[in-house]
Image: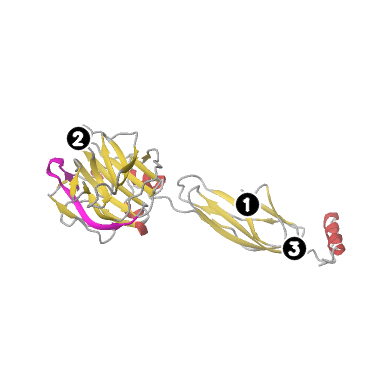
Amino acid sequence: MARLFAKASTQYLEASYSLSVAPVTFACWYRPASESGTAAHVLMACSDPAAQTLAFRMSMIESSVYATTYQVGASAHSITAGTLADNTWGHCGAVFASATSRTAYLNGTAATTNTTNINANTLTRFNIGIFSRNNSRFEPADGRIADAAMWTVALSANEMAALAKGASPLRIRRESLAGYWPLYGFQSPEQNLAGALSLTVTNSPTQAEHAPVAPHSRKFWPASAPYIASNAAPTANAGDDQTIILPATATLNGSGTDDGLPAPITYSWAKQSGPGTVTFSPNNATANAVASFSEEGTYVLRLTVSDTELSHTDDVTITVNPIPTNAVLTPQVARRRRRRVRFGRRR
């Protein structure tokens, strides 16, 4: 179930909550009953209820999502180009990354980030369905709200897209999830599935059909909205340690695994330590590159695997031994030996 908020009845949910500064992220599903006119319908907000304007706020105005930072005497907005039709479910989001970064989202698509330098601070109240200021409440929502969540970090574009495709907030940055309220409408205070921040219900927003996302309403979950996880970091494997004898090379056995989000993985080798130089063939961006060493010694090579958003590293140790004294020297190795003798480095 979801909560149905009637604008005329000034229905909302509320809790005391302390938030000093950004970052913070809001997200919820919303089904507007009416978006005519220029009045704001506030979906989620953190504010100083005693101040005139001091808040982070996500609202809908004329069918577009607004991510707004309020400071006394000033405000800054990011506004989605896309719009949400009346009586249609859509996923709304607002990411406040810093004092100079706020981005609105509609159905996983980001608006242009607003970079005006404005920051709200010392906020003490959290609301769903209304905006608290000047010791009063304004601009109530008019429609159904479900699966509301708040994080004390700035979610990435990929994570916002995952939420819009049906991912549960419980699977996105759980360690920074301050609250997740499915808004089942069974009780007051409204249950928080991610922590202790329960919301007091005012004027009884009623139960209604839930948003089209699993696991709440399979009946209404369209095939175009699969339940997917957020991006996970890839895993790098640099292979087993090796021992070689000059002038031999080392074929590196690097590999990586990933969930495929948000892009195919890439590889990069680099020398972490060792006495000489290391050359990678055909280049250092090949998982199974061939490494050549300028002189004997112990080398640590690092493999970095990246999916363009997250990365992971793993190290391998290559022990490079000198050529035996009774071996037949190639001209190149012989010249190297003569140079070492000349400079007092015979080994």
Q: Dot 3 lies on which element? A: loop
Viewer-closest of 183 and 113: 113
Residues at discs 2 and 1 in contact (Cβ within 8 Å): no
Give the spatial CA distance, label 2 vs label 3: 75 Å
Residue at the spot 12% in from the left edge and 44% down from the top edge: 9
Q: Dot 2 lies on which element? A: loop
Q: As displayed, is residue 226 above or below residue 303?
A: above
Q: Which residue is mark 1?
A: 288
Give the residues drawn in magenta, as a range: 2-20
Tag 3: amino acid: Glu
Residue 291: name its quadrant: bottom right
Q: Which residue is mark 3?
A: 296
Residue at the spot 20% in from the left edge and 49% down from the top edge: 134
Q: Residues within 10 Å of mark 1 (few under 14, many from 20)?
A: many
Q: Which mark is residue 254?
A: none
Q: Position of residue 26 (x, y in %)?
A: 31, 48
Residue 240 lies in the magenta stretch: no
* Image side of residue 265 versus residue 117, left or right: right
Q: Position of residue 43 (x, y in %)?
A: 25, 45
Tag 2: amino acid: Ser
- Say which quadrant the C terminus sits in: bottom right
Residues at discs 2 and 3 in contact (Cβ within 8 Å): no
The answer to whether residue 329 is visible is no
Q: Dot 1 lies on which element? A: loop
Q: Main secondary structure of the magenta part?
A: strand
Q: Which mark is residue 34?
A: 2
